[in-house]
């Protein structure tokens, strides 16, 4: 037993913990639980922990995956509850196992969004028609400056239903090559159909899949 994977939830106040801060929080949680984390060698050793697909600040998730290494055998079945006992509110570990697949095999992400409107939501059919367009180019900022990402084909399987104050939608977006942040779905409305733009939007990750749409573990 060496490399292990944890599936965990990040919700409520914990959704506002940044990626780097989350790594620090998790290290403290492991320390409090007495989990024998493995550290890198060298002048400045650090815990060998990685989040498979980093999560944006403010976004919730029920399917986060984290890889880590340990220095001795541990009880995988009991580890989640041991960690939960010393974890902050909103961070909940679900299951621990030895991974059989590499994180690079993650291709798709199922997510849920709540679009809220102060003055009444638009007709769901208008949103469905918008997201079914043959082309949905959205301008986004990258490390190299601004670029255009084509959402059509990289965001699919849309489903809509009325929600209090707005519309709830579920969809599948590309998680790699290209990586589509669900927040770009709202940005597309802002740029291409401002009359449909919500006043506020929140997102939650539901499940990761490989290229064949098999749930990734």
Image (cartoon, rainbow, N blue to C red):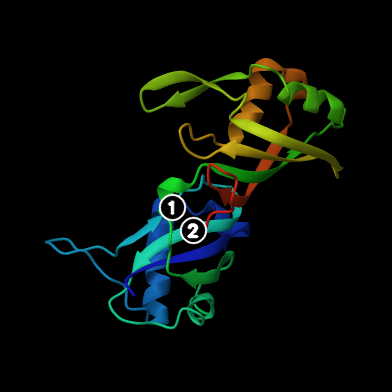
Instruction: Using the image as rendered, state which of residue 179 and residue 200 is in the foreground.
Output: 179
Looking at marks 2 and 1 on the same chain, the residue that comes earlier in the sequence is marked by 1
Q: Position of 72 compared to 103: left or right?
A: left
For the residue pair 9 and 155, the one nearer the viewer reads as 155
Label 1 residue SS? loop
The residue wearing badge 2 is 65
On screen, 185 above or below 26? Answer: above
Q: Quadrant of residue 116?
A: top right
* Residue 63 vertical position relative to residue 105 in the rendered view, above or below: below
> Looking at the image, is 112 positioned above or below residue 198?
below
Which residue does the image show at 40% across and 53% down from the upper left? 102
Q: Position of residue 162 (x, y in %)?
A: 86, 40
> Which residue is at a point 59% across and 64% down the rendered structure image?
90
In this picture, residue 65 sits left or right of residue 157: left
Residue 122 shows in this picture: no
Q: Position of residue 44 (x, y in %)?
A: 17, 61
Q: Position of residue 34 (x, y in %)?
A: 37, 82
Q: Residues within 10 Å of mark 1 (few under 14, many from 20)?
A: some
Residue in the picture at 30% in, 81% down: 72
Say the numbered circle drawn on residue 182.
none
Q: How many marks?
A: 2
Residue 157 seen? yes
The outermost residue toward the left is 43
Quarter of the image for the N terminus: give it: bottom left
Q: Are marks 2 and 1 in contact (CB under 8 Å)?
A: yes
Q: Residues within 10 Å of mark 2 (few under 14, many from 20)?
A: many
User: Element under label 2?
Assistant: strand
Q: Would you identify the image quadrant in which residue 115 lies?
A: top right
Residue holding disc 1: 52
* Residue 197 in picture, x, y percent from top left: 73, 26
Of residue 181 and residue 173, the one placed in the foreground of this image is 173
Marks 2/1: CA distance?
Answer: 6 Å
């Amino acid at each position: 037993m060496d490399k292990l994977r944890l599936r965990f939830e990040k919700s409520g106040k914990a959704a506002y913990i940044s990626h780097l801060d989350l790594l620090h929080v998790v290290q403290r949680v492991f320390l409090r639980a007495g989990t024998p984390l493995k550290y890198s060698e060298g002048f400045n050793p650090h815990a060998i922990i990685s989040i498979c697909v980093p999560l944006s600040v403010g976004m919730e998730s029920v399917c986060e995956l984290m890889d880590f290494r340990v220095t001795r055998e541990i009880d995988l079945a009991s580890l989640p509850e041991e960690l939960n006992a010393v974890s902050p509110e909103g961070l909940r570990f679900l299951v621990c196992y030895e991974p059989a697949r590499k994180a690079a095999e993650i291709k798709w992400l199922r997510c849920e969004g709540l679009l809220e409107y102060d003055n009444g939501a638009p007709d769901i059919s208008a949103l469905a028609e918008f997201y079914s367009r043959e082309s949905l180019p959205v301008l986004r900022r990258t490390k190299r400056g601004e670029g255009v990402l084509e959402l059509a084909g990289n965001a699919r399987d849309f489903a809509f239903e009325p929600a209090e104050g707005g519309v709830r939608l579920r969809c599948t977006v590309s998680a790699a090559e290209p990586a589509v942040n669900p927040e770009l779905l709202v940005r597309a409305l802002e740029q291409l159909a401002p009359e449909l733009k919500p006043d506020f939007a929140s997102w939650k990750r539901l499940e990761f899949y490989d290229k064949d749409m098999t749930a990734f573990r």
